[in-house]
Amino acid sequence: MIAYVTGTVAHKEEQIVTLNVGPMGIALSVPTSRDYQIGAAATLYTYMHWNQEQGPSFFGFASQTERQVFLLIISCQGIGPRIALAVLADLGAQRFLEAVHMEEDRTLSKVSGIGAKKAEHIIVQLKHKVAQLISSGALEASAMHLTEWNTVTQALESLNYSRQEINRVMTHLKSNTTDQKQTFDQLMRQALSFLSKQS
């Protein structure tokens, strides 16, 4: 399996980037080509998807986290590569993880090809996997702050707060937290302060 390719961008379309790699030109489907410049060097982390009717398709991603999240999305029953690319193009890997972790079905339903029912389906199918991915430390530094969010959720559950209460406090924290590097203790203090004012 080819883990990544490095080459020079020879051509790009909305969701396709062609790299010159030695004597070959490799066309890869990407979430968006806007960050790639023709003539510039680029490294894309790759994935080959096999379709029974269309054969192989090659996908490229700007980071390992982006590829991980793409694979996570297509592991959801009924969700294919086209919708996975749309999710990454519209939300990005980190925002998608946040949306699933915080059960933001409205955020997911705004992505092209995902309605309200499909958004709920994705959350049900992937919430546990996202929590495992966050807890395992498998994500790159750009998405690692989700570990603290996950720990806050688990702590609130252990204190017997309801799912609705937890969802409200997580929405509040997300809306009022500008520093993404806040520690668990800082986030937990804000969460308990918010909850105390609700009672």
Image (tube, helix red, strand yellow):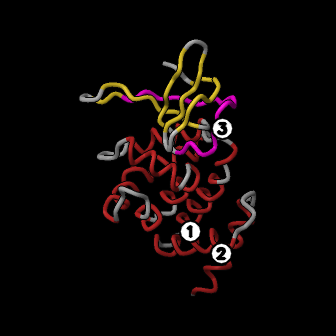
If you read the primary sequence from the N terminus, does the residue marked by circle 3 or circle 1 appear first? 3
The residues bearing labels 2 and 1 have C-alpha atoms spaced at a distance of 11 Å
| The stretch drawn in magenta includes residue 150 | no
Amino acid carrying mark 2 in the image: Leu
Amino acid carrying mark 1 in the image: Leu
In the picture of the structure, the residue carrying the numbered disc 3 is: 37
Residue 11 lies left or right of residue 71; in this view the side is right
How busy is the neighbourhood of tag 1: few (under 14 within 10 Å), some, or many (20 plus)?
few
Q: Which residues are magenta?
A: 32-49
How busy is the neighbourhood of tag 3: few (under 14 within 10 Å), some, or many (20 plus)?
some
Amino acid carrying mark 3 in the image: Gln
Cβ–Cβ under 8 Å for marks 3 and 2: no
The residue lying toward the viewer, choosing from 160 and 75, is: 75
How busy is the neighbourhood of tag 2: few (under 14 within 10 Å), some, or many (20 plus)?
few
Question: Please, what secondary structure does the residue beneath circle 1 have?
Answer: loop
The residue lying toward the viewer, choosing from 108 and 195, is: 108
The residues bearing labels 3 and 2 have C-alpha atoms spaced at a distance of 47 Å
Query: Which quadrant of the figure has residue 35?
Result: top right
Question: Please, what secondary structure does the residue beneath circle 3 have?
Answer: loop
The residue lying toward the viewer, choosing from 44 and 196, is: 44
Point out residue 177 in the picture as x, y percentages from the top left corner.
Answer: 70, 69
Residue 141 lies left or right of residue 22; in this view the side is right
In the picture of the structure, the residue carrying the numbered disc 1 is: 159
The quadrant of the image that shows the C terminus is bottom right
Q: Residue at x 57, y 26 (%)?
A: 19
**In this view, the mark in front (2 or 1):** 2
Point out residue 47 in the picture as x, y percentages from the top left corner.
Answer: 47, 29
In the picture of the structure, the residue carrying the numbered disc 2 is: 192
Point out residue 11 in the picture as x, y percentages from the top left corner.
Answer: 56, 32
If you read the primary sequence from the N terminus, does the residue marked by circle 3 or circle 2 appear first? 3
In the image, residue 141 sits, relative to residue 182, either above or below, namely above
Point out residue 150 in the picture as x, y percentages from the top left corner.
Answer: 58, 56
